[in-house]
Image: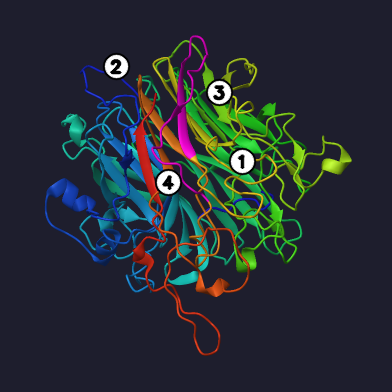
């Protein structure tokens, strides 16, 4: 669902709410209940029964979900909404494509502070015949990259990129859209019903129909002004726009950051505004709104020979007029990225490795990922233009020769012998930017992994009323950890359980962080080959955290429910990665193999879990 480069809350709370303990529960909370029940939003709101083939499939598919998002209601922290790329409707039980379902945004609702969730889908998916389907005004068949944000009036906004032309599935539109949920009884309704009723979705940018080129929108971000000031209620949405053909053009592609805003609660949006006028090859925008209503958009700038970007860095644009216009891009901090790459047996550069066409010369199996930037602000702090930033680069002086074609570092600042095939250790760095002056604190590791080992990936941060909360993936429990290898890979090419979700909290007054706390109750293997016809791993590109005051909730992609198996197609190929999942195939007389006829058996059971964080 994402096109990754190949080199790689508001008003003061008037009520007291009971919230769960900050310690992880034994089992965490499962947001994606595709082993039991998916319910139409129409039924959630009205109580009237409705179902369809997609919801029926989603209630039993034990399918894949990744790239989670979460948002805690600022009016009532008991209401927690999650989302993800949800593949639950893709397959029928016999392994055929269901014909109606496609990858779509999940909508997972909790009214008990994240202890339990009811699973649903954002209306408008292919096969949705509910009365709410007509409220969706988007033109594509599938959607992903969900991002969520609340206003102060019971409205939830969900942003997405969407790809496939429903009338020509070989083409992609690459659109971007925003959906709106409201309290069915209006802003004055009981807060337990906040963000419950889907009222609309609409395209805010349209791509061009092409198999793998043209104009494609991706890497989404959303935020809402909850300051109570003149911009209160404004919805801000940003994304990366890719142009060119990354597969066939010798110059690769250009990527720029675009921005839209809504001043009428998501009914309409402004024309897309290009923020990155002087920099190119940039991705991962995030949006921070400070207490005075100023808007900051941060993003990663890639070093690229095809653009004028000479370093990997964090850039930002600032707006002091409610997102109507922005400053020129400003570089904040350069870094040495952690971007895992390898070489396919065919010789092409690999951002992930698996089997068959995706087998890499190193023999390792790993999902894609690269250094990204997340940012936020404390909307309750009207005295400062402080933006809080986290990112996950390579830690200096942890670079080591990998001894294989695998590497995570390709910096031109390294000695010549280390320009390729260099591994490193990644960590979660944090700093505070003063948007008013451009100055920032020295980046520091939130939790230094160098003394114990392990990598740290995919951070996110939330700040409210002086409390900071951060979340990330951590491989400190990887029994085969080495900076020379990808996460969860042993020297013999086998894979092991290696990833956990960790979190920490801190104070904006001191910028000091608490010791890291493990959230996930089970360490899981991120290298299960569930994608591409069971040939390579994919865990998405981000995790998510949201907070109201001291209450914070985090969500992550989790492999604990995956059922292992064997792949009949690999007979005799000496593959020993241990990453094959449960599947059912037969060999045809001509030597080819059937599709997997048991996708509901657990081989694809990748889920979203969550818990209260410190």
Q: Residues within 10 Å of mark 2 (few under 14, many from 20)?
A: few
Q: Which segment did they paint magenta?
A: 500-526
What label sits on residue 558 in the rendered view?
4
- Rendering coords of residue 518 (x, y %): 44, 31
The residue beneath circle 2 is 12
Whether residue 266 is visible to the viewer of this picture, yes or no, is: no
Q: CA distance from mark 2 to mark 4?
A: 34 Å
User: In the rendered image, which quarter is residue 215 located in?
Assistant: bottom right
Q: Nearer the viewer's eye, disc 3 or disc 1?
A: 1
Q: Earlier in the sequence, mark 1 or mark 4?
A: 1
In the rendered image, the residue lying farthest to the bottom is: 589
Q: Is residue 557 left or right of residue 315?
A: left
The residue beneath circle 1 is 481
- Rendering coords of residue 409 (x, y %): 73, 41
Q: CA distance from mark 3 to mark 1?
A: 20 Å
Q: Earlier in the sequence, mark 4 or mark 3?
A: 3
**Of residues 270 and 387, the one drawn nearer to the viewer in this rendering:** 387
- Rendering coords of residue 309 (x, y %): 75, 39
Q: Residues within 10 Å of mark 1 (few under 14, many from 20)?
A: many
User: In the rendered image, which quarter is residue 216 located in?
Assistant: bottom right
| Dominant secondary structure (helix, strand or loop) of the stretch shown in magenta | loop
Q: Nearer the viewer's eye, disc 1 or disc 4?
A: 1
Q: Earlier in the sequence, mark 3 or mark 1?
A: 3
Q: Residue at x 78, y 38 (%)?
A: 310
Q: Secondary structure at mark 1?
A: loop
Q: Nearer the viewer's eye, disc 2 or disc 1?
A: 1
Q: Nearer the viewer's eye, disc 2 or disc 4?
A: 4
Q: Earlier in the sequence, mark 3 or mark 2?
A: 2
Q: Secondary structure at mark 3?
A: loop
The residue beneath circle 3 is 446
Q: Earlier in the sequence, mark 2 or mark 4?
A: 2
């Amino acid at each position: 669902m994402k096109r990754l480069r190949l080199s790689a809350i508001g008003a003061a709370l008037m009520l007291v709410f009971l919230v769960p303990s900050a310690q992880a529960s034994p089992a965490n909370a499962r947001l994606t209940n595709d082993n039991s029940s998916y319910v139409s939003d129409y039924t959630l709101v009205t109580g009237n029964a409705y179902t369809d083939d997609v919801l029926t499939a989603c209630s039993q598919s034990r399918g894949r979900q990744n790239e989670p998002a979460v948002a805690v209601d600022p009016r009532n922290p008991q209401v927690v909404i999650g989302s993800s790329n949800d593949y639950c409707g893709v397959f029928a039980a016999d392994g055929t494509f269901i014909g109606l379902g496609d990858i779509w945004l999940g909508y997972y609702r909790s009214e008990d502070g994240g202890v339990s969730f009811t699973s649903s889908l954002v209306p408008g998916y292919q096969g949705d015949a509910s009365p709410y389907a007509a409220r969706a005004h988007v033109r594509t068949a599938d959607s992903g990259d969900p991002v969520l944000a609340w206003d102060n009036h019971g409205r939830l906004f969900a942003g997405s990129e969407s790809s496939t032309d429903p009338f020509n599935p070989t083409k992609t539109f690459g659109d971007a859209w925003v959906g709106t949920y409201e309290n069915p009884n209006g802003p004055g309704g009981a807060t337990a019903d906040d963000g419950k009723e889907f009222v609309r979705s609409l395209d805010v940018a349209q791509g061009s129909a092409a198999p793998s080129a043209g104009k494609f929108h991706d890497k989404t971000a959303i935020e809402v002004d909850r300051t109570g000031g003149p911009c209160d209620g404004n919805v801000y949405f940003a994304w990366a726009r890719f142009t060119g053909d990354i597969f066939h053009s010798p110059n690769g592609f250009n990527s720029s950051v675009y921005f839209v805003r809504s001043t009428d609660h998501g009914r309409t949006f402004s024309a897309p505004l290009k923020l990155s006028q002087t920099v190119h090859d940039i991705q991962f925008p995030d949006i921070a709104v400070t207490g005075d209503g100023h808007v900051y958009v941060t993003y990663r700038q890639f070093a690229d020979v095809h653009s004028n970007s000479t370093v990997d860095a964090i850039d930002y644009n600032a707006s002091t007029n409610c997102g109507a216009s922005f400053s020129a891009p400003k570089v904040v901090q350069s870094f040495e990225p952690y971007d895992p790459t390898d070489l396919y047996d065919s010789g092409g550069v690999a951002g992930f490795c698996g089997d068959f066409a995706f087998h890499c010369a190193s023999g390792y199996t790993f999902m894609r990922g690269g250094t990204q930037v997340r940012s936020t602000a404390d909307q309750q702090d009207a005295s400062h233009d402080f933006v809080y930033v986290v990112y996950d680069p390579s830690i200096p002086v942890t670079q080591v020769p990998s001894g294989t074609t695998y590497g995570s570092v390709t910096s031109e600042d390294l000695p010549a012998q280390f320009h390729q095939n260099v591994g490193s250790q990644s960590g979660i760095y944090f700093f505070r930017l003063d948007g008013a002056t451009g100055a920032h604190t020295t980046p520091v590791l939130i939790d230094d992994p160098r003394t114990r080992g392990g990598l740290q990936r995919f951070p996110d941060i939330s700040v409210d009323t002086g409390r900071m909360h951060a979340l990330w993936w951590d491989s400190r429990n990887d029994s085969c950890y080495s900076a020379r290898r990808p996460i969860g890979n042993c020297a013999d090419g086998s894979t092991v359980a290696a990833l956990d979700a960790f979190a920490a909290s801190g104070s904006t007054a001191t910028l000091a962080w608490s010791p890291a706390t493990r959230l996930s109750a089970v360490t899981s293997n991120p290298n299960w080959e569930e994608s591409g016809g069971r040939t390579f791993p994919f865990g998405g590109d981000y995790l998510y955290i949201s907070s109201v005051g001291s209450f914070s909730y985090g969500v992550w992609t989790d492999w604990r429910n995956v059922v292992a198996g064997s792949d009949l197609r690999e007979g005799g190929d000496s593959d020993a990665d241990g990453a094959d999942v449960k599947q059912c195939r037969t060999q045809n007389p001509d030597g080819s193999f059937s599709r997997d006829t048991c996708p509901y058996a657990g081989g694809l059971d990748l889920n979203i879990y969550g818990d209260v964080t410190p």
